[in-house]
Amino acid sequence: MVRRQIEARGITDSKVVAAIRKIPRHLFVSEALMDQAYNDFPLPIGEQQTISQPYIVAEMTQALQLEKEDRVLEIGTGSGYQAAVLAELAFRVYTIERIHPLYVKTRKLFDNLHYHNIVSRYSDGSLGWEEESPFDAIIVTAGAPEIPKVLLNQLDMGGRMVLPVGDQYSQELVKLYRDEDGIHKTHLGGCRFVKLVGEHGWRAL
Ligand code: SAM
């Protein structure tokens, strides 16, 4: 998986590659899908949600340019896999999930895998995590209709944020960087995520 899907497509950050190599991705999917865990596509994780394609996890993680002392906010815990990748690279990961059974399941999983630097919360992540802000990096792993300003306000000086922005069928992966001059935006390419549902995302049905 790492050689064919990640390195071959231009992921060059050796720390990101090492983290992905280390984490047993099959532990983050149901037993029935374990034999597909290393394939080049997203997989269902229940509750109509997905674990992202390995390459997208690598691309978003690389774009965050994490340092060992960084505090990272993730919106959309899902299977917990992306949080585990972040936890290998940063000081602490704060992750938020809005679907209760996924939140409960991943809490147990983080404990079982001894990820003591992941703090998780059950709430609407489109509001961010004000009490723990500012963050060095923010990653949103669900598609937003637009960039939530409230999240940008929780980004520290020098901070990086990566998120998919677009309609519910396709989005553009956007990277934002904050410095003294303001916010700088770059586009990383097309992607397709499930919806960010919440006050600063899409409305729940
Ligand atoms: N990062 C995940 C992983 O590694 O498996 C993949 C996330 S999945 C593509 C998107 C997740 O975002 C779903 O679990 C969904 O319930 C969650 N989500 C959507 N809107 C949310 C919100 N407002 N707050 C928190 N989580 C949200």
Image (cartoon, rainbow, N blue to C red):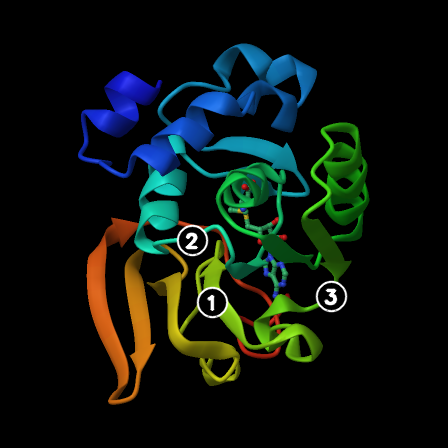
> Which callout, 3 or 2, points at the residue further toward the start of the chain?
2
Residue 7: x and y, percent?
23, 27
Q: Quadrant of the C terminus?
A: bottom right
Q: Amino acid at mark 1?
A: Asp
> Which callout, 2 or 1, points at the residue further toward the start of the chain?
2
Left or right, 18 with reference to 132: left
Left or right, 191 with reference to 30: left
Mark 3 CB within 8 Å of ligand 1: yes
Circle 2 packing at 10 Å, graded few (<14), some (14-19), many (20+), is: few
Q: Nearer the viewer, residue 26 or 155?
A: 155
Q: Amino acid at mark 3?
A: Ser
Marks 1 and 3 in Cβ contact (< 8 Å):
no
At x 62%, y 40%, the residue is 80
Label 1 element class:
strand
Q: Which mark is residue 136?
A: 1
In the rendered image, which residue does mark 2 sit on? Answer: 67
In the rendered image, which residue does mark 3 sit on? Answer: 123
Marks 2 and 1 in Cβ contact (< 8 Å):
yes
Q: Nearer the viewer, mark 3 or mark 2?
A: 2
How far is the residue under mark 1 from the one under mark 3? 21 Å
Task: Check the image and name the residue furthest to the top.
Answer: 35
Circle 1 packing at 10 Å, graded few (<14), some (14-19), many (20+), is: many
Residue 124: x and y, percent?
68, 69
Q: Is residue 47 above or below residue 17?
A: below
Q: How many marks?
A: 3
